[in-house]
Image (tube, rainbow, N blue to C red):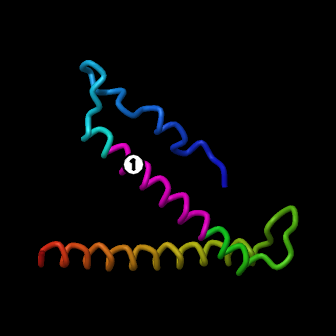
Amino acid sequence: MESGFGSDFGSDFGSGSGGGGKLDPGLIMEQVKVQIAVANAQELLQRMTDKCFRKCIGKPGGALDNSEQKCIAMCMDRYMDSWNTVSRAYNSRLQRERANM
């Protein structure tokens, strides 16, 4: 899936340094975090699209019929709910492990 979503982040590295060409490590880390978040969102969307398409679309055509639309909507809702549940559990576990260090 190709989109303009986040495609120009790489060109911004060091642009806000303000002094003598030195790179700001904090700025770079924030940009890396944004790039990772964008990549994760793109991967989530791609996986959800692939799985729900395979599950709901029997014969691809020019338009979705009513049952395919409902199936896609329900599939995407379930996928997002599952993703959010797993993400919360993962983040909770990370916090517990960091607290025990």
Q: Residue 42 vs residue 65: left or right?
A: left
Which quarter of the figure is the N terminus placed in?
A: bottom right
Reading the image, the residue beneath label 1 is 34
Quadrant for the C terminus, please.
bottom left
- Asked whether, in this view, residue 8 is left or right of residue 63, the answer is left
Q: Residue at x 71, y 71 (%)?
A: 69
- The residue nearer to you, when weighing 87 against 28, is 28
Q: Could you tell me which residue is drawn at 30 percent across and 22 percent down?
A: 21
Could you tell whether 10 is left or right of 100 in the image?
right
Q: Residue at x 43, y 54 (%)?
A: 36
Residue 20 vs residue 51, the one in the foreground: 20
Quick check: 27 above or below 76? above
Residue placed furthest toward the top: 20
Residue 85 lies left or right of residue 56; in this view the side is left
Which span of residues is magenta-colored?
30-47
Check residue 32 for magenta coloring: yes
Q: Position of residue 53 (x, y in %)?
A: 71, 73
Relative image position of residue 46 (x, y in whole percent): 61, 64
Q: Is residue 78 above or below residue 25?
A: below
For the residue labelled by badge 1, is the local secondary structure a helix, a strand or a loop? helix
Mark 1: amino acid: Val
- Residue 31 higher or lower than 70, as above or below: above
